[in-house]
Image (cartoon, grey):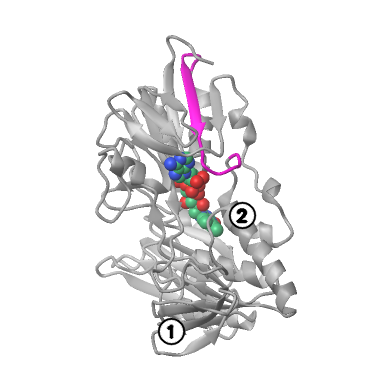
């Protein structure tokens, strides 16, 4: 594998950004490049966005990314090993298994970790994160064993009402757990949805048997006599019985390696990058969810892939810039179609809304327009997101037709 003249690239993290990086590098680089990807999960990179399939009878083998990205003599994939230290002077990284890897260019693609709220009892058995295959398998195994032990269906609470929280609630329900979503903000998905859309999503979930408590903070978790979580306390002093808790709040950039190596990190977390994905050390790039551009982090696959593309082009000496990315997404959460794109929350001065809401049918369509009432800035779709691909591409453009024709139900 070692080639005396080769440029050695080491990628830390074998997740979705790393996978894209390798795919692109393979296509664009010549024979004079070697890349070693080191990941601390015991698996090859997989599609994290499909984690819920593990609750529908699937296994980790059902979440593949194009694996042949690693079938290349120039590429080495190391799994189940964690990089513990970067020596920037020697240009080496050291792993848990005490291996040293030398680099000319280091790419940090360490993603984010699912945190837990800092409340008493958050580490009790029965409390889980929802980020990795290992998390999902542990949750599934716990629910199976505990339901047999108690000889009844379990009661679950998901702490966090963002997209991942709603997905986790759907996952719990799929394995027979009675799920409640607890959200500190006054509405579900507060970063993506306005109040009306949030309440329509809440009605959808309730109709599917998922309970929702908004404007509520968890203050404590209590164990039963065997030490397993059994009750959850809320800010207003009320209690709820619970057998399993999933935390989907407190996502943190895994920037500790960079921080310990003296590479600049943002005060709110994330490795500071410029628009070429360069960190404060010219030999080190950062891509994906761990990177912070102008104080913003990007928790979606599309920007992670875009950063990977920019990093590859830059390493190969080409011009490329990551200009930032809007957080647009269309997703099905616990059976509900939801899309949010562009300036969905109408933060642009003078923006105007054109909307249609039918809470009974569970449909909401909103377009946010510039002050000229014709230029599309963004929007929200709930209940039917089929117009999302077309509308998303029109952001920034003047709408040809009357804006209301995009949101009103078609007649006949
Ligand atoms: C349940 C769920 C559903 C999601 N759904 C969507 C969706 O529908 N659409 C969407 O766009 N996005 C979705 N996302 C977000 C998306 O998965 C992430 O934005 C994306 O995975 C980011 O890629 P990444 O490579 O930066 O991080 P990751 O994919 O997290 O990869 C980082 C990897 O680095 C490893 N690592 C960290 N530190 C070290 C170290 N020191 N040494 C070795 N390895 C290390 C981590 O274990 C991990 O394997 C979802 C996320 C989750 C959890």
| Nearest-to-viewer mark from 1 and 2 | 1
Q: Foreground residue, 119 or 251?
A: 119
Residue 326 disc label? none
Can you tell which mark lies on residue 234?
Answer: 1
Position above or below: 279 against 389: above
Query: Which region shows up in magenta?
Result: 30-44
**Location of residue 386 in the rendering, given as x and y in whole percent from the top left corner:** 59, 63
List x then y, in percent, for residue 180: 56, 79
Q: Is residue 337 left or right of residue 290?
A: right
Q: Distance between the residues labelled 1 and 2?
A: 31 Å
Residue 310 drawn at (x, y percent): 39, 34
Label count reads: 2
Residue at 38% of width from left, 69% of height from top? 118
Q: In the depicted view, which residue is nearer to us: 205 or 34?
A: 34
- Quick one: label 1, few (<14), some, or many (20+) residues within 10 Å? some
- Name which of mark 1 and mark 2 comes first in the sequence: 2
> Could you tell me which residue is drawn at 56 percent across and 68 percent down?
125
x then y, percent, for residue 3: 48, 11
Can see residue 262?
Answer: yes
Is the distance from the Cβ of mark 2 to the nearest ligand 1 atom less than 8 Å? yes
Q: In which quarter of the image is the N terminus?
A: top right
Image quarter in which the C terminus is found: bottom right
Q: Is the magenta stretch mostly helix, strand or loop?
A: loop
Is residue 142 within the magenta segment? Answer: no
Q: What element carries label 1?
A: strand
Secondary structure under the numbered disc 2 in the rendered image: helix
**From where the camera sits, is residue 304 visible?**
no
Examine the rendered structure and indicate whether residue 268 appears above or below residue 203: above
Q: Label 2, on which residue? A: 50
């Amino acid at each position: 594998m070692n080639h005396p003249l080769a440029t050695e690239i080491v990628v830390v993290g074998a997740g979705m950004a790393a996978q894209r990086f390798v795919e692109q590098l393979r296509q664009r680089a010549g024979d004079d490049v070697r890349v070693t990807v080191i990941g601390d999960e015991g698996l090859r990179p997989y599609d994290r966005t499909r984690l819920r399939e593990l609750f529908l009878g699937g296994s980790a083998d059902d979440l593949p990314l194009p694996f042949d990205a690693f079938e290349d003599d120039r590429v080495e994939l190391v799994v189940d090993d964690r990089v513990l230290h970067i020596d920037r002077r020697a240009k080496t990284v050291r792993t848990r298994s005490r291996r040293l890897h030398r680099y000319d260019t280091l790419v940090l693609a360490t993603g984010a970790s699912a945190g837990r709220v800092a409340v008493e009892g958050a580490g009790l058995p029965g409390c889980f994160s929802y980020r990795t295959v290992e998390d999902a398998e542990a949750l599934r195994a716990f629910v199976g064993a505990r339901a047999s032990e108690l000889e009844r269906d379990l009661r679950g609470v998901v702490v966090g009402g963002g997209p991942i929280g709603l997905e986790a609630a759907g996952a719990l329900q799929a394995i027979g757990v009675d799920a409640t979503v607890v959200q500190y903000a006054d509405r579900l998905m507060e970063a993506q949805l306005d109040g009306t859309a949030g309440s329509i999503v809440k009605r959808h979930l309730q109709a599917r048997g998922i309970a929702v408590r908004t404007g509520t903070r968890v203050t404590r978790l209590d164990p039963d006599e065997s030490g397993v979580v059994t009750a959850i306390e809320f800010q207003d002093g009320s209690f709820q019985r619970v057998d399993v808790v999933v935390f989907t709040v407190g996502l943190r950039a895994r920037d500790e390696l960079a921080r310990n190596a003296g590479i600049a990190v943002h005060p709110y977390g994330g490795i500071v990058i410029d628009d070429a994905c360069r960190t404060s050390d010219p030999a080190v790039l950062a891509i994906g969810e761990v990177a912070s551009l102008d104080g913003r982090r990007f928790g979606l696959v599309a920007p992670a892939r875009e950063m990977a593309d920019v990093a590859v082009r830059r390493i190969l000496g080409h011009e490329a810039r990551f200009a930032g990315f809007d957080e647009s997404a269309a997703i099905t959460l616990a059976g509900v179609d939801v899309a949010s794109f562009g300036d969905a929350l109408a933060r642009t001065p003078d923006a105007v809304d054109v909307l249609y809401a039918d809470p009974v049918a569970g449909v909401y369509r909103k377009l946010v327009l510039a002050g000229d009432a014709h230029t599309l800035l963004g929007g929200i779709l709930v209940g039917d997101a089929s117009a999302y691909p077309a509308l998303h591409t029109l952001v920034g453009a003047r709408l040809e037709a009357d804006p209301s024709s995009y949101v009103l139900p078609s007649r006949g």
